[in-house]
Amino acid sequence: MDMQISRQQAAGGASGHLTIDLGALRDNYLTLAAMAPTAQTAAVVKADAYGLGADIVSQTLFDAGCRNFFVAHIDEALALRLRLSAEARIFVLNGLQPGNETSCAAMAVTPVLNSLEQIAQWAAHAKKLGKPLPAAVQIDTGMCRLGLSPEELGVLASGPQLLEGIDIAFVMSHLACADEPDHLSNAAQLSVMRKAAVAFPDAPVCFSNSGGIFLGNDYHNHLLRPGIALYGGAPSIARPNPMKPVVRLDLAVVQTRTVPAGSLVGYGGSFETAGPTRLAAIAAGYADGLPRSLSNRGAAWYNGVRLPIAGRVSMDSIILDISALPEGTLTQGSLVQMIGSEQTLEDIADDAGTIAYEILTGLGRRYRRTYIQPGETPAVASTSVSHK
Ligand SMILES: *Cc1c(COP(=O)(O)O)cnc(C)c1O
C-alpha cells in the first residue's frame, strides 16, 4: 500500500484538519517578551496548553527562551516534567494538595502556595527532607479565587518563621479584569499587590496574564504570565488583536444535497428552507468542541463566502447552507474554514456566546493535527484549494 498520501488526501474523511502554527506561537512569545524587556516571560500551558498540546507547545517555547511554565494540576506538571529540560521550572497554579508534597519535591515541581495551610505543609516537608524547597506564593489581591487573604498575610508578617525552609521563587497574584483596560479593579489590584509585596522584599513579583501585559509597564514587574495571547487569542476586548493566529481549523464536507422550499433541516427541524437550498454536511460537531449554541447562528467560510449553519449542531456533523456558492463548488472532501483568516477564534466564540478560551480548550481530539514547525511554510490544504 502506498503510504505517501498528501495531507489533502489525509484530511479527506477525517473529522477535520487542525493546524497549529508553532512559528506563530514562538513569534507571539517573543512579541510579549519584547514588551517588557527587563522582565522574564513565563508561559501558561495548563489544560494541555489551551488544547494545543502541552508537550510540543512547551518545547517550542523553551526553545524560544521560556524557562518558567505554569499548569493548573499536579498531574499536568508531572507529565510535563518528564518531557521538559530540567532547566525549566514548572509551577502548579492550583496549589499544594495534601499528599502531593512528596511527588512535588521528588519531581522538582514547584507548587504555588495559596494558603497558610499549604505553606505549613511545604515547610514541614522541607524540614523533613532537611533542605529548602522552592515555591511561589500567591496573594489574593481582589479576585477572591486563590491565594492568601489579607488576614493570612498579616499572620505571615508577624510570623516570618512560618516560611522557614521555603525558598520563595516569586510572589504572584492574578488580575480579574485585565482584558478590560478601563476596569477600575486593575489599578486597585496592582496597589494591593505592591503593598503585599513589601512583606517579601527579596522575592520577584509575577503579576500579569495576557491582558495585564497590555495594561502598561506598571503591571509588568519581574515575570509575565501569559496564556491566551501566546495561542493567538485577543489579550484585550477593547483593542484590535495584535497577536498572530496560531490555530486553523478546516473541516471536510461529507455530503451535499439540494432540497426544496419548506424542508426542515437537522434535529428538531429548527431551520426551514425558504426556497430551493443547497446544503453541505461537514464532519465535526459538538463532540469536537463546536458548541451546540452555534446552531442557526454560526457559519463556516469558503473563499471569502460565509456559509451559515443551518439547523442544530449535531454531535459529529454540522449542516451548512452553501447556496451562496456556485453549484458544484463544494463536493465531498472539500474543506471549509471554521477558524482561521476568515473567521477568528473570537468570531466563533462570539457566535457561540462564549470566549476564545473555551473554544480553544474544547477543540476535539478527533481532528487530524498538523504542527507547522517554526520556519516551515504551511503546506497544508487551505480553503482556497479546490478538491475536485
Ligand atoms: C490561566 C491563568 C493565566 C493565563 O491567563 P491568560 O488570560 O490566558 O493570559 C495566568 N495566571 C493564572 C493564575 C491563570 O489561572
Image (cartoon, rainbow, N blue to C red):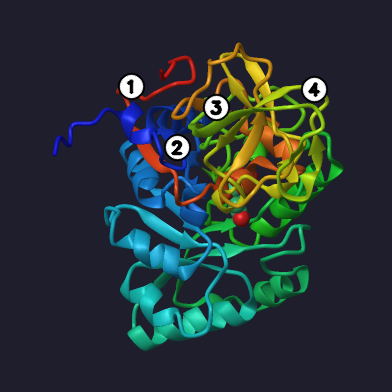
> Could you tell me residue 117's position as x and y percent?
61, 82
Query: Mark 3: which secondary structure?
Result: strand
Where residue 113 sits in the image (x, y, percent)? 56, 70
Q: Which residue is mark 1?
A: 379
- Mark in front: 4 vs 3: 4
Residue on which disc 4 sits: 275
Q: Tag 2's secondary structure?
A: strand
Quadrant of the snapshot with the N terminus: top left
Q: Quadrant of the C terminus?
A: top left
Q: Judging from the image, what secondary structure is the residue with disc 1 in?
A: loop
Residue wearing tag 3:
337
Cα separation between marks 3 and 2: 10 Å
The single residue placed furthest to the left in the displayed view is 1
Q: Nearer the viewer, residue 194 or 71?
A: 71
The answer to which of marks 3 and 2 sits earlier in the sequence is: 2
Q: CA distance from mark 4 to mark 1?
A: 39 Å
Instruction: Tell me, yes or no, whether the two marked residues, 3 and 2, touch with CB atoms within 8 Å.
Output: no
x, y (%) of residue 256? 56, 29
Q: What amino acid is found at the position of numbered circle 4 in the picture?
A: Gly
Numbered disc 4: secondary structure: loop
Q: Which residue is mark 2?
A: 18
Q: Earlier in the sequence, mark 2 or mark 1?
A: 2
Within 8 Å: ligand 1 and the Cβ of disc 3? no
Dividing the picture into quadrants, the one containing residue 152 is bottom right
Q: Given the image, on which type of amino acid does mark 3 rest?
A: Gln
In this view, the residue farthest toward the top is 326
Q: Position of residue 372 (x, y in %)?
A: 34, 30
Disc 4 Cβ-to-ligand 1 distance below 8 Å? no
Q: Which mark is residue 361?
A: none
Q: Give the Cα distance between marks 4 and 3.
A: 25 Å
Q: Amino acid at mark 1?
A: Ala
